[in-house]
Image (spheres, grey):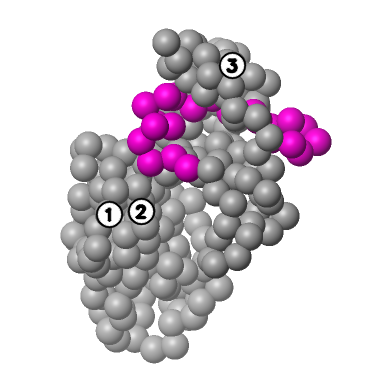
Amino acid sequence: KGKYILAEGADGSGMTRTIAMERALDDALVAYGMNGEMLRPENGYPLRLVVPGVQGVSWVKWLRRIEVGDQPYGTKDETSHYVDLMPDGMLRQYTSIQEAKSVITSPSGGQVLLNKGFYNVTGLAWSGRGRIRKVDVSFDGGKNWRTARLENPVLPKALTRFNIDWVWDGSPAILQSRAVDETGYVQPTYAQLRAVRGTRSIYHNNAIQSWQVAASGDVANVQV
């Protein structure tokens, strides 16, 4: 009859998370090692829950207890924390799925384009709901979009590298990427995200990331 599990950490705050049973039985695991060695304390030694497709905050560190129940537990970490405050004062029900997201990694903040000309723009995309179907890239702040190339392998719930060619003419530009996953979900703009999550949330941020390229070649983070 168990439909959910409760995972509890041994940290001072007693971090707890509810995980749906079908997700726990799919590709979740209890990890004791990483990269050929035992987990380090900062990574959750001796045990850590790993649940592909959900946000990292649900990958409970220092795991000490797993309980099975027939309904969501609604712990403090799922009711007073990691929830979104809506305009009417209500809190949006906690969700843990990592929605589709992408980010351009080159060029990105702090970098400098030294000259006009050809650049290969690259980045990463991922979705907790499955495979990335495509990534579109804009060089004018979202007015026009071009489809980027996806580099194999394109795996479910995994980082997918994308790239696209761009000839910079030396004028200011705003670079953005927009991921679409195999369910048809489209990575939102900040305005679209706020319409769903409200304006006072610092969680669940999968909005389109913008990089502004100045005429000097300096690249900086901006919000569009």
The numbered disc on residue 155 is 1
Q: Earlier in the sequence, mark 3 or mark 2?
A: 3
Is residue 22 a member of the stretch shown in magenta?
Answer: yes
Q: Earlier in the sequence, mark 1 or mark 3?
A: 3
Among the 4 quarters of the image, the one containing residue 38: bottom right
Residue that mark 3 sits on: 74
Q: CA distance from mark 1 to mark 2?
A: 6 Å
Determine the CA span between mark 1 and mark 3.
Answer: 32 Å
Question: Which span is picked out in magenta?
Answer: 8-29
Q: Which residue: 32% across, 59% down? A: 160
Q: Is residue 57 visible?
A: no
Query: In terms of depth relative to the viewer, which is nearer, 156 or 118?
Result: 156
Q: Which mark is residue 158?
A: 2
30 lies above or below 38: above
Binning the other alpha carbons within 10 Å of mark 1 as few (below 14), some (14 to 19) or many (20 upward) gives few
Q: Of all residues shown, which one is farthest toward the right?
A: 12
What residue is at 45 percent from the left and 15 percent from the top? Answer: 2
Relative image position of residue 107 (x, y in whole percent): 42, 73
Q: Are dots 1 and 3 in contact, CB under 8 Å?
A: no
Task: Name the element at disc 3.
Answer: loop
